């Protein structure tokens, strides 16, 4: 099974060890499913981890370790444009929808 995780789930895994997001992340690390990510998502993870409110609770090395681990997943380097009339509810998450469409097509 291939799974796309929202960036908030990934951040939640780092913020709350042993919480539900961390259980999902650990399941991927244990090869219970294939993780699909993209360079866009890895860039977003790096970017949001620098927000002042997150920098105080997330050491840079933990983000770096997660990004390095995720580079072993299925990484989509280019994403197709969304078809006309297809929009993400949150424009900042359009890349997640594009990832799903790329994997479906």
Image (tube, helix red, strand yellow):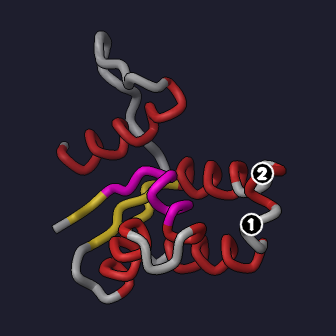
Residue 57's disc is: 1
Residue 79, relative to residue 77: is it above or below?
above
Cβ–Cβ under 8 Å for marks 1 and 2: yes
- Asked whether residue 11 is drawn in magenta, I would say yes
Return the x and y of residue 3 as percentages of the image width and height. Answer: 27, 61
Residue denoted by label 2: 53
The front one of 102 and 57 is 57
Q: Main secondary structure of the magenta part?
A: helix
Residue at 80%, 60% in the rendered image: 55
Residue at 54%, 31% in the rendered image: 92
User: In what quadrant of the picture does the N terminus appear?
Assistant: bottom left
Q: In the structure shown, which secondary structural element does the residue marked by tag 2 occupy?
A: helix
- Asked whether residue 80 is drawn in magenta, I would say no
Residue 82, relative to residue 97: is it above or below?
above
Residue extent of the magenta highlight: 4-12
Return the x and y of residue 29 as percentages of the image width and height. Answer: 38, 84
Q: Residue furthest bottom?
A: 30
Distance, label 1 to label 2, CA atoms, is 7 Å
User: In what quadrant of the picture does the C terminus appear?
Assistant: top left
Q: In the structure shown, which secondary structural element does the residue marked by tag 1 occupy?
A: loop
**30 relative to 45 in the view: left or right:** left
**75 relative to 60 in the view: left or right:** left
Return the x and y of residue 8 as percentages of the image width and height. Answer: 50, 52
Determine crowd level at label 2: few under 14, some 14-19, many 20+ residues with C-alpha closer than 10 A.
few
**59 relative to 104 in the view: left or right:** right
Tell me where residue 5 sits by quadrant: bottom left
Tell me if residue 73 can be seen.
no
């Amino acid at each position: 099974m291939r799974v796309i995780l929202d960036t908030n789930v990934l951040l939640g895994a780092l913020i709350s060890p042993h919480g539900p997001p961390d259980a999902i992340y650990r399941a991927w690390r244990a090869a219970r499913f294939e993780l699909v990510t993209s360079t866009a998502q890895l860039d977003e993870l790096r970017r949001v981890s620098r927000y002042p409110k997150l920098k105080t609770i997330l050491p840079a090395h933990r983000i770096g370790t997660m990004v390095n681990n995720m580079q072993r997943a299925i990484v989509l380097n280019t994403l197709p444009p969304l078809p006309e009339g297809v929009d993400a509810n949150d424009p900042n998450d359009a890349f997640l929808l594009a990832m799903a469409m790329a994997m479906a097509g």
